[in-house]
Image: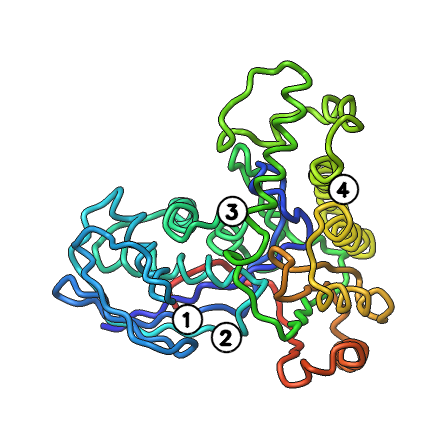
Amino acid sequence: MQYHIFSPYRVCPLGAHVDHQHGLVTGFAIDKGVDLCFDVRQDSQVILDSETFTGHVEFDIAMPTLVKQGNWGDYARGAKYALQKRFKLEKGIKGTIKGSLPVGGLSSSAAVLIAYVMAFAKANNITLEAFEVMKIASEAEREYIGLNNGLLDQACIALGKKDHLLMLDCESNEYRLIPKAPNMPEFELGIFFSGLTRSLMSSDYNLRVTECKTAAWIVQAYENVPLKTHDKTFLRDVPESSFKRNRDNMPPRFARRADHFYSEHKRVREGITAWETGNLEWFGSLSKASCESSIHSYECGSPELIAIYEAMLTTDGIYGGRFSGAGFKGACIALVDPSKKESIEKEITEKYLARFPQYKDTFKVYFCKSDDGARFV
């Protein structure tokens, strides 16, 4: 019997770059993502092909996990690694995986990991709740892949629900799925790919995480709070009042990272109210403010992404938006008026390619809708 898992990509309109500091985040699962079709094998071999990447991946699911191989198969090996810590794995799969959009900014890595965790669990008769899938996939990404991210990506992908905004508290792991208000105008999500693909592992992503932790450490040191090891230090544990008392004594780069964290925390809280009251204009303006903070305080965003964002600011029919993902290459996302999609695509494309004509073959615009989380089809 063949199985088919759809694992959606995600977008995060508010709550940028704060999940790894135990902040508040929001997100949608979208109706584009990763499809994994597979058969369960009677032996322990995993045999995978990809319609997105070249090469063929094979390994034994019952054996200890090998070190990373440096190819797309590492995500399957990572899923195996995290599952093996909890369960005995005996049966492999033979499958093919494909993605429906270019990689970059939509957390394709988390979507792929979640698909593999679900597939290996199914093959080995392991029943997992969505929250468990999310935690296992996150562990695989942090401990095996080596990306120090929080739970935002996996939460959106595993827990998402159509026409609902997910709000996740990354300290307590409590979450809410907030339905679209009855009076809210129709909207879709515009995704504008810069034409640059990216690897978070080769970007400044992990450096930014370290800078945020260092900012927390500096404040705690000034306040004579007992310090924890760096891996257990988070800005969420530092009251904003403590930060404000010591801000001017800190090296400016660390102060800017903390500025972003505290201001983004406020924007998420306001954004929840805007969403609950159906005020898309307000929600969109907060998403724009989030992007401004990402540029100036968190200091991410390639010239290409900043150009797309600036084009969005003067385009009719866009409520608001920001960089997607870590914001080093990848894509920008926007909440848009569906009746103006054609003019939005034309205008953004013209403005962007006027500045970066070298991306005329790789710049892409897509429109999508919110969707349910990862599931068997």
Q: Identify the residue at image location x=17%, y=67%.
A: 41
Label 4 sits on what residue type? Glu
- The spot of residue 11 in percent (x, y) is 61, 59
Residue 270's label in the rendered image is 4
- Look at the numbered discs 2 and 3 and tell me whether their residues touch, using CB distance below 8 Å: no
Mark 4 and mark 1: Cα distance apart in space: 35 Å
How many numbered discs? 4
Judge from the rendering whether residue 215 lies leftward or rightward of residue 32; answer left or right.
right
Label 2 sits on what residue type? Ser
Mark 2 and mark 1: Cα distance apart in space: 8 Å
- The spot of residue 267 in percent (x, y) is 75, 43
Q: Identify the residue at image location x=64%, y=72%.
A: 193
Residue to which mark 2 is pinned: 100
Label 3 sits on what residue type? Asn
Q: Nearer the viewer, residue 217 or 262?
A: 217
Label 1 sits on what residue type? Asp
- Look at the numbered discs 2 and 4 and tell me whether their residues touch, using CB distance below 8 Å: no
Q: Earlier in the sequence, mark 3 or mark 4?
A: 3
Mark 2 and mark 3: Cα distance apart in space: 23 Å
